[in-house]
């Protein structure tokens, strides 16, 4: 981006999606580390915070889609593709982390 250029609405929305979903994935991974350490009291809080952040990113994406559907202008950019990939990755991350947390719960329950 050269001097004098500003980011457009789509670029700002993409950065919003990427930031929220990235932070959500960090919460999910921190929850997984907490579960591995047996700190199950922190797991729920971290997963809930991650879900809240993910929803923020998802809402930005939905608003972008709704706006573009109304105008008939569907943007196609590398940044938008990256933002959408982050959304998909975030959803997958949450799914896998939830499964691993259950495994860690079971393992910790077996310990004497």
Image (tube, grey):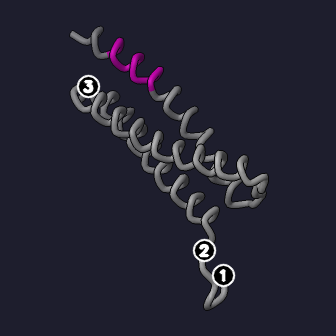
| Residue corresponding to mark 3 | 40
The quadrant in which the N terminus is found is bottom right
Examine the residues drawn in magenta and state their main secondary structure.
helix
- Please, is residue 74 above or below residue 25 in the view? below
Q: CA distance from mark 2 to mark 1?
A: 8 Å
Residue segment shown in magenta: 98-107
Q: Which of the two discs, 1 and 3, sits closer to the camera?
A: 1
Q: Residue furthest front?
A: 70
Q: Which of the two discs, 3 and 2, sits closer to the camera?
A: 2
| Cβ–Cβ under 8 Å for marks 2 and 1 | yes
- If you read the primary sequence from the N terminus, does the residue marked by circle 1 or circle 3 appear first? 1
Residue at x 65% of width, y 45% of height: 66
Q: CA distance from mark 1 to mark 3?
A: 45 Å
Front-most of residues 107 and 30: 30
Residue at x 27% of width, y 33% of height: 45
| Residue corresponding to mark 1 | 1
């Amino acid at each position: 981006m050269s001097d004098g250029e500003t980011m457009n609405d789509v670029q700002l929305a993409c950065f919003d999606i990427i930031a929220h979903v990235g932070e959500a994935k960090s919460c999910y991974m921190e929850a997984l580390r907490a579960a591995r350490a047996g700190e199950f009291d922190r797991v729920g809080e971290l997963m809930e915070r991650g879900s809240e952040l993910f929803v923020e990113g998802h809402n930005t994406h939905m608003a972008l889609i709704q706006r573009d559907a109304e105008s008939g202008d569907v943007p196609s950019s590398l940044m938008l593709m990256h933002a959408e990939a982050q959304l998909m990755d975030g959803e997958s991350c949450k799914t896998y982390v939830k499964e691993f947390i259950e495994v860690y719960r079971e393992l910790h329950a077996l310990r004497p």
